[in-house]
Amino acid sequence: MAEMRRLALEAGARIMEIYEADDFDVKVKSDASPVTEADEAADALISAGLRAAFPEVALVTEEQAASHGQSVETFLIVDPLDGTKEFINRRGDFTVNIAYVEAGVPTRGVVYAPAKGRMFYTRADGVAVEEDGPFDIETPGTQRPIRVAAPDNAALMVVASKSHRDQATDDYIGKYAVKDMTSAGSSLKFCLVATGEADLYPRVGRTMEWDTAAGHAVLLGAGGQVVRFDDHSPLRYGKEGFANPFFIAHAPGVALQPA
């Protein structure tokens, strides 16, 4: 975790250098999604660091995923810049995500939102914490254990995607008694459930494992759950192609509605 935290901070610093520049390069990948020089710089930095520190552990990253066709069970997985659209539009809701998956379950993860000044991770004992800044590379600041809220099913707090909101998502949310809704970009949505700022985050749309693994680990460490949308079984990792089904991240106690 110390190495993952350090690499997330270093990548975040590099991302912010590019974010605060007058202009930066944006390209379009084969799946029509955007990629910036910040994605590529952060990917190179994190990949080099993880391979040096953990040479025996398989590594999957968003920018190098094409080289990983087969399924794996225990591996490191990285999204160097989750929320590229938020980054391009300078909205700030982007994150650096590094996770360790064991036997299909994300057990360790760090989510760092450099523009927001928020950092969440699982400690070595598996407990999820939010660290207070300033974020020193070598010496962690105050770590506050975080915990999911006890939900009130008559007045739920819901968080949904800022860039990928659609009618199917709204239709599903409409099955619940909602007190209030908020929107957030990237993996921050998992962290809002983990801190008790939201009770429920449904995702009715395409995601990849690198989008979700670190936030999933943080939520698990805070007592939360992430389940498949169709049958409410636990969301697993290391699937061939690394594509996720639709899913629901939630605090225990939320009365999940059928798909």
Image: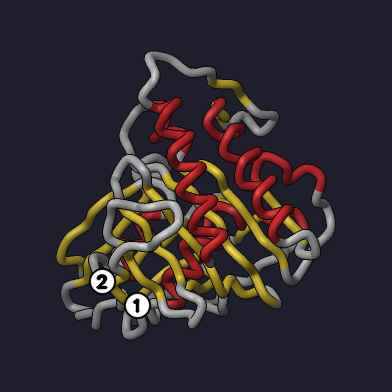
How far apart, in angstroms, are the residues tagged by discs 2 and 1?
8 Å
Looking at the picture, how far across and down is residue 68, in whole percent? 80, 51
Say whether residue 246 is visible. no
Q: Residue furthest top?
A: 22
* Label 1 element class: loop
Single out the residue that lies furthest toward the front: 138
Mark 1 is surrounded, within 10 Å at the Cα level, by few (under 14), some (14 to 19) or many (20 or more) other residues, namely: many
Residue sitting nearer the eye, 89 or 3:
3
Which residue does the image show at 50% across and 70% down from the upper left?
Answer: 217
Please name the residue shown 40% across and 33% down the image: 16
Q: Nearer the viewer, residue 213 or 127?
A: 127
Looking at the rendered image, the disc whose residue lies closer to the viewer, 2 or 1, is 2
Task: Check whether the beta carbons of the residues at disc 2 and disc 1 lie within 8 A of each other.
Answer: yes
In the visual, does 230 lie left or right of 250? right
Q: Which residue is mark 2?
A: 196
Q: Which of the 4 image quarters holds residue 242?
A: bottom right
Disc 2 residue crowd, few under 14, some 14–19, many 20+, Cα 10 Å: many
181 left or right, relative to 235 = left
Q: What residue is shown with label 1? A: 251
Q: How many marks?
A: 2
